[in-house]
Image (cartoon, rainbow, N blue to C red):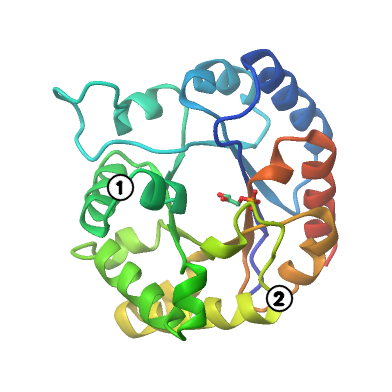
Amino acid sequence: MGKKPFIVGNWKMNLTLAEGVEFAKSLGNNLHGKNEIMCGICPPFIFLKDISKVLEGSGICMGAQNIHSEINGAYTGEISALMVKEAGCTHVLIGHSERRHLFGEIDSFINAKIKTALSVNLKPIFCIGETLNEREEGRTKYVVKKQLKNGLMGIDNKCVEELVIAYEPVWAIGTGKTASPEQANEVHSFIRGFLTDEYGKDIANSVYIQYGGSVKPENTKELIAQTEIDGLLVGGASIKLESFLKIIDAASIQ
Ligand code: 13P
């Protein structure tokens, strides 16, 4: 599609602050002048402010791993879109499968979070994907379509353009089992088709669709070579600088 690959590392609940800061510094140094790729990292909330300072001027963007759907209020323990924006985030992961499956987040809550993120100019990285059961029962497209429809309900065309969609099959996350490039591309095409039907070809083509689930240096090239894969959302392999850099390198050479 002629887009620059967008590679994002989701650190989840890993690393110490000192390790995270060191990682961000080295990442910035290593990517200096590398213009053929876009890169981002999603550190834990409490690292955001420090890491944002380190990333300043590097061209690497920063995302939060979650937000609440309300901008403020009595929500003990939660973090708002404005807070992560103030800490330097441009992006936010919304609807990650770990949030859906471990913390019971449902489509309507995810939809509200996407709307809130957009309202403060944070770009959502909207995560969707089927479980192993759902795939084995042949329900992948049904599930993905339902997540898209519910997650994007009431969001206008202009805002949809701002989104990144991450297709992360749940059975491939943290399991070492990657979807084959063809399996991933098939679902990506389906997502693109959905966006085309709902919002038109131009918007559908401008939306970034990332793949996530056991991405590693060895499978990056093949995944990113697929016509409908515009980027990658990397978990485990993004918390080691060496493997994350290898992924970025492999994605840059096309
Ligand atoms: P892994 O790369 O560890 O499978 O995790 C993927 C993921 O959940 C990224 O958001």
| Residue 220 image label | none
User: Which corner quadrant of the image does residue 41 belong to?
Assistant: top right
Instruction: Quadrant for the C terminus, please.
Output: bottom right
Find numbered disc 2 in the image and state the secondary structure of the residue it sits on.
Answer: helix
The residue that label 2 is drawn on is 181
Find numbered disc 1 in the image and state the secondary structure of the residue it sits on.
Answer: helix
Q: Which residue type carries mark 1?
A: Leu
Question: Residue at 65% of width from left, 36% of height from top?
Answer: 59
The residue that label 1 is drawn on is 118
Position of 48 with respect to 153 (left or right) is right
Residue in the foreground of this view, choosing between 40 and 203: 40
Q: Position of residue 42 (x, y in %)?
A: 55, 36
Which label sits in the foreground, 2 or 1? 2
Residue in the foreground of this view, choosing between 6 and 97: 97
Q: Position of residue 101 (x, y in %)?
A: 39, 52
Question: Residue at 44% of width from left, 22% of height from top?
Answer: 87
Q: Is mark 2 within 8 Å of ligand 1?
A: no
